[in-house]
Amino acid sequence: MERMTARSTEQSWAKYKHYRNFLATGTGTLSKRPRFEPEEPCYMDYGKGCRLWDIDGNEYIDFRNGLGPISLGYCYPAVNDAVADQLKKGTVFSHPCTLEGEVAERIVEMVPCAEKVRYLKTGGEACAAAFKIARAATGRDIIAQCGYSGWLNSLASGANVLPRVREDAPKGVPVEISRLHRAMPWNDMAPYEELFAEEGGNVAAVAVAMDYATADKGQKFLTKLRELTQKHGALLFLDEIVSGFRVALGGYQDYCNVDCDLAVFAKGISNGLPLSVIAGKAAVMDELERAVVSSTYSGEALSLAAAKATLNIYREHDVIGHFYAMGKRFQAGVNALFEQYEYPLEARGLAPCLALVDCERGRTVKDATNELFRESYAHGLSLYSVCYINFSHQQHDIDEALSRLEDTLKALA
């Protein structure tokens, strides 16, 4: 198939091949590693709202949103202003700053399970800390892991080491540690019942990250897990790294109206500044008095200033409603085009974070998702296996993106 070549990414690929000599794996985030030469850009120069420009000057309507953390939009004025004001005062101090308490108070007001919170910088390390807290609170060792929770998933044999990559024998993890982490399925209670029947007295927590394509069908599953964990004295831990402040103001627990003991937030809290939050019941979080989790940068002020501004915008505007309105418009348009051009993909799940999944159509396309991503870059559209809506996506952006998607599908036809 002849590829569209009007957009050059020559500078991007030249720099990427050069920098790989110095940077292990070529990038610090494996899900951002470029795969589709020459269509895909390797490096972005700047972003504004819901659009990105690469170092070759090409413009893209973006649905990757930094893999989720850009919830309001690139260079969102209120957040940028808050960060700029704080930068004049300082970034990290020799003692705490009041922003730590101010942001904590807002989170406790907004998140159902949050009676107390603690900060770290990334979702992965926050999950690691939550595992430690759960073990300290219960005196047990086993963590049952459902869904993708970042690179910490690789502790469990058979879990996803990347969102779409499974590994039976995780490299770099001693077998003795791997045995304490169990990879578990989504929306299937039987394996959990078997696990608790066999080792219920040693299960510290069930850690759940929602399945994007079927997140709208998870309430009954989580309710049953809540009952099972309570019956056996284990904790229910929700990975809200993606779902927090996105599928509902208080996260997936709020959407499903399910009580949990611990939760981790990251991507929705500070519009791209590095911050993660462990939130939970006071009795559980107070284990941090003894099970030490401490970091020099946990109270870093720029990220907390960004979080304060971001959470204020969530409270003052119907950000979640906008996610759903624009997401449903995008989903309807995408699925109509896939059907019209008989392309074997479908957008499913909750509108703020739609999953592109394989489905049966009139024709077969090998590697349909990869082919779509490759060609969409050539038409100024940046898609992902999970398409995120941000607050800066407006109706005209969605409609223009659908027009670019139609051009993409025509080229693939």
Image: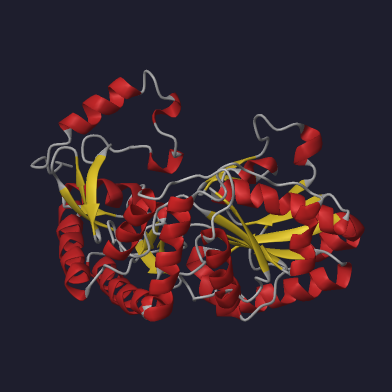
Asked if 155 appears above or below 103 in the picture, the reply is above
**Residue located at (79% from left, 57% from top):** 287
Asked if 362 appears above or below 39 in the picture, the reply is below
Q: Residue furthest top?
A: 21
**Residue located at (50% from left, 61% from top):** 242
Name the spot of residue 208 as percent of width and height, x first.
65, 62
Name the spot of residue 240 as percent of width and height, x first.
56, 63
**Residue located at (13% from left, 42% from top):** 57
Q: Nearer the viewer, residue 154 or 88?
A: 88
- Which quarter of the rendering shows the C terminus? bottom left
Left or right side of 62 for 29: right
Asked if 183 appears above or below 200 in the picture, the reply is above
Left or right side of 55 for 382: right
One can see residue 363 in this view: no
Name the spot of residue 202 as percent of width and height, x first.
88, 54
Q: Nearer the viewer, residue 60 or 312?
A: 312
Tell me which corner region of the image, top left, top right, bottom left or bottom right, holds residue 407.
Answer: bottom left
The colour style of the image is: secondary structure
One can see residue 209 in this view: yes
Name the spot of residue 7 as percent of width and height, x first.
11, 42
